[in-house]
């Protein structure tokens, strides 16, 4: 990934990740488990359902320490089968 996170942010910093995926009970657990591997912490995501209930969005504040860590988190969250988007 060619990002400019290191030019735009001072580390450590808190980033708000928004993860959108298929509506199922496992989505928050899958996302939190992956985050724990790369940025251990105490997470309590805010979950919102789409208007039709087909998708859920999770808002999660994560303390990150480097550009590489941000890129890894994006890649790993996107790789989860039921995740559709990571912002």
Image (tube, rainbow, N blue to C red):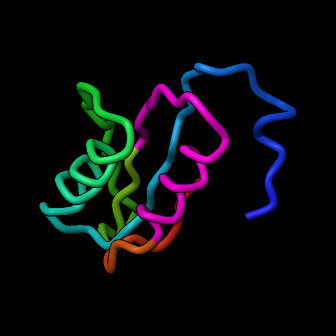
Q: Is residue 36 above or below residue 76?
A: above
Q: Is residue 72 above or below residue 69?
A: below
Which residue is the extreme one toward the left? 25
The range drawn in magenta is: 59-78
Say which of 3 and 44 sits in front: 3
Residue at the spot 38% in from the left edge and 48% down from the top edge: 58
Q: Is residue 57 above or below residue 81?
A: above
**Quarter of the figure with residue 76:** bottom left
Quarter occupied by the N terminus: bottom right
Residue at the spot 26% in from the left edge and 68% down from the top edge: 23
**Quarter of the figure with residue 9:** top right
**Quarter of the figure with residue 12:** top right
List x then y, in percent, for residue 53: 30, 67
Residue at the spot 29% in from the left edge and 33% down from the top edge: 40
Residue at the spot 14% in from the left edge and 63% down from the top edge: 26
List x then y, in percent, for residue 46: 33, 37
The reply to whether the magenta stretch includes residue 75 is yes
């Amino acid at each position: 990934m060619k990002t400019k996170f290191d030019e735009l942010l001072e580390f450590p910093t808190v980033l708000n990740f928004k993860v959108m995926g298929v509506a199922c009970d496992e989505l928050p657990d899958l996302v939190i488990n992956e985050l724990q591997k790369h940025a251990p912490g105490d997470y309590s995501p805010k979950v919102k359902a789409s208007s039709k209930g087909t998708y859920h969005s999770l808002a999660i504040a994560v303390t990150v320490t480097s550009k590489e860590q941000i890129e890894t988190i994006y890649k790993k969250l996107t790789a989860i089968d039921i995740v559709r988007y990571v912002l």
